[in-house]
Each structure stands twice: as C-alpha cells, then as structure tokens.
Amino acid sequence: MKFNLLPKEEKFFELFKLQANKVKEGIEALDEMVNNYVDIEKKYRKIEHIEHEGDAITHDIFTRLRETFITPFDREDIHELASGLDDVLDCIEGVASRLNFFGIKEPTPQLVELVTIINKAVCQIYEAIARLKTLEHVHSFCEEINTLENRADLICQSATASLFEHAETVEQLKDLIRLKEIYGRLEIASDRCEDVANVIEGIVIKTA
C-alpha cells in the first residue's frame, strides 16, 4: 500500500484545470473567428488577452513548483504539462494573429476544418486534465487526441499541396505564402496537443 508521510500540494490540479480551460477558451474563440469571419482584429485581441491570462496561470504553476516540497506527481511532468498547455495556447494565438495581420480575406474550408479538429483535441485535453487527480478514463482521451492529430496532418499535407497546385498568379502566390504559414501553425498546434497527451499518458504509467 502506498502512503505519504507528508501531504502533497493539491493546488496543482486546480491550476492545471484553470490552464486547460484557458486553452479551451482560446480555441473556442478561434473557432468562432473562422466560422463568423467579421471584426477580425477585435476577435484577435480577445484571443491575445486569453493567451496573456494563460501565461499568468503558467507562471503561477512554475512558481508553486519551485516553492513546493511534495508534489502530486513528478516535478518534471508538472513542468512539461504546464509548458505543453502553454504551447498549445501560443499556437492558437499565433494562428489568430496571422489571420489578422496577413489580411486573410476569407478562411479556406481546410483551415476551418483544422480549427475544428484542434477544438476537439483541446476538449479531450480538458476532459483528461479534469480527471488528472483520479486518472479515470484518461487513456481514452489521449487516444482520441492522437487520432485527431493524424487527421490534422493529412489535411495539412493535402491543403498545402493544393496551394502549390493552383498558384499561378501573383495573388495566388501571395496566398500560398500566407496560408502555408497558417496551415503550418495549425499543424504545430495539433502536434502540441499530442505532446500534452503523451505527458498525461506518462503520468498515468508512472502512477499506476
């Protein structure tokens, strides 16, 4: 039977849930942005603000990690999980900023689909984080994130190939450069979701 002589700091679970919720807010705002493509700068500024709030939570986790003697799981895993969630939100903000500053007139169907996939992946992350204390059904959420990441890779490859295939005019070449950058950022966001899932699965293995 496992037991601890000293109490573990339980505040981490609350902070991780707050951080995951902030990532969820960010992707939901991006989803709304690409599906209702008006007032782009205003919507970007909202996502930028969410990202700043997420940074503050990440900082709180790192501060508590430095000051806490007994942690609920490995210190390295706490650091990697917080960093991974922060990376996902950074990517979301990066997509929104590019949509705003690149002057994208209208998101492509592939772009919208990629945002939808990342939204689903973030929802899976949130559900897994919400169960981090008990680790109940966490593996199934992580499996779904991996499946979604594979789908996102295929869409990114197809969408990028299509850009090169149809780039003939100067404007189309400009679109190629702008959209390729945004597709790449979305693919990275999907990869970072998978990284978070891998950290969570590592926690499950270590605590089993």
Image: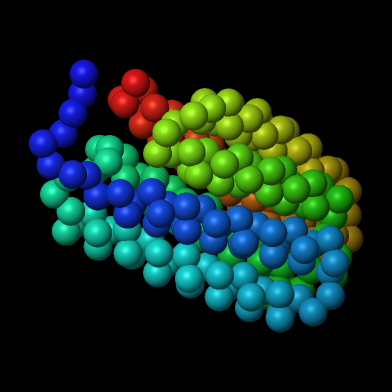
Q: Residue at x 79, y 79 (%)?
A: 39
Position in image of residue 25 (x %, y %)? 62, 61
The answer to whether one can see residue 147 in this image is: yes
In this view, the residue in front, 83 or 18, is 18
Q: Which quadrant of the view contains residue 200?
A: top left
Q: How many marks?
A: 0
In this view, the residue in front, 172 or 187, is 187
**Quarter of the N terminus within the rendering:** top left
Q: Residue at x 85, y 67 (%)?
A: 36
In this image, 161 relative to 76: left or right?
right
Q: Which quadrant of the view contains residue 173?
A: bottom right
In this view, the residue in front, 67 or 166, is 67
The answer to whether one can see residue 190 in this image is: no
Q: Residue at x 31, y 40 (%)?
A: 77
Position in image of residue 112 (x %, y %)? 80, 52
Q: Which quadrant of the view contains residue 154?
A: top right
**Quarter of the C terminus within the rendering:** top left
